[in-house]
Amino acid sequence: MVGMVRRRTPKVNTSPPGASALVDSVYEQIVGLLIDQRIAPGSPLRTEALGTELGVSATPVREALARLETTGLVDRSAHRGWRVAPPLSRNDQVRIIELRLLLEPENARLACGRADDALRAQLAALAARQAAAPVGPDYAGYAGYLKADWGFHLLIASSTGNPYLEKAFTTVSGYLQRFQLFDQHVITDARECSAEHGAILDAFTRRSPEIAAAAMRDHLLRLRDRVVASTDS
């Protein structure tokens, strides 16, 4: 009928209460299994078997594995399902940092130019959390450190005002695989990373976008140097 307004049926969230928290928990547990190499590279990841081991159904396991594809820790193929990905080579890790060098200095410049007191406080809290976090000797020991470290970079990317830059940044995989660089699974560059994040935070505090970009670039170049140096250690 002409002039008749079609009413939209409201979308109903059919996920059970706590489903997101359950997937988050399963995700973290699987990350721990992979990073601590309790499941060997190349091994198949069966959702039912993992669910039984973790005491959950296959559904949150599937959702967690889908999220893990973006980290580079698992691979999926149409016929073979999910498998543990092979470790990143040092060359691959260097290439990832080189990609970050194209994105993150600009992220820092834009985010600093838009930053308010709330954003600066959030960055300061993440930097403090990273500096105070344990550094090993296994994933349970340094999970908080990695979350604060990556969260610092992710917050900057999400504060640029450009959703395409944020999306490009979140496709960068491999940050969880930094554990390969740690001697005896203990983070060895925590002091350096904290100091470099401190320089970025200082630029945000001084409200200097150009200095923020330079500090981010310096941080990533130093990180790349540490990755290269670890090849010869």
Image: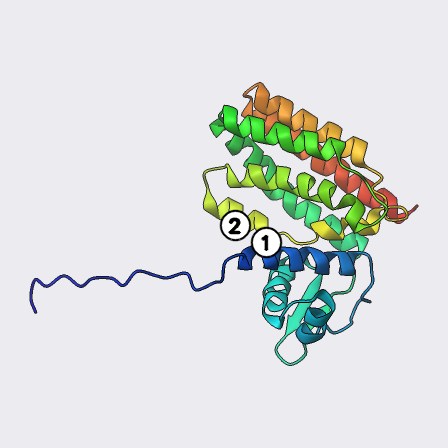
Proximity of marks 2 and 1: CB atoms separated by less than 8 Å: yes
Farthest residue to the left: give it: 2
SS for callout 1: loop
- The residue type indicated by label 1 comes to Thr
Q: Quarter-wise, where is residue 225 in the image?
A: top right
| Residue at 51% from the left image edge and 23% from the top image edge | 117
Compared across the picture, whether 233 is left or right of 205 comes to: right
| Residue at 89% from the left image edge and 46% from the top image edge | 183
Q: Quarter-wise, where is residue 88 in the image?
A: bottom right
The percent position of residue 11, horizontal first and vertical second, equals: 34, 61
Label 2 vs label 1: CA separation?
A: 7 Å
Look at the picture and state if 201 lies above or below 45: above
Compared across the picture, whether 75 is left or right of 171 comes to: right
The percent position of residue 127, horizontal first and vertical second, equals: 67, 31
The percent position of residue 39, horizontal first and vertical second, equals: 80, 66
Crowding at dot 1, Cα within 10 Å, few <14 / some 14-19 / many 20+, comes out as: few
The percent position of residue 209, horizontal first and vertical second, equals: 55, 26
The image shows a total of numbered marks equal to: 2
Farthest residue to the right: give it: 233
Crowding at dot 2, Cα within 10 Å, few <14 / some 14-19 / many 20+, comes out as: few
Q: Which residue is mark 1?
A: 171
Q: Which residue is mark 2?
A: 167
Compared across the picture, whether 230 is left or right of 210 comes to: right
Q: Nearer the viewer, residue 138 or 179?
A: 138
Look at the picture and state if 23 lies above or below 77: above
- The residue type indicated by label 2 comes to Lys
Image quadrant holding the C terminus, namely top right
SS for callout 2: helix
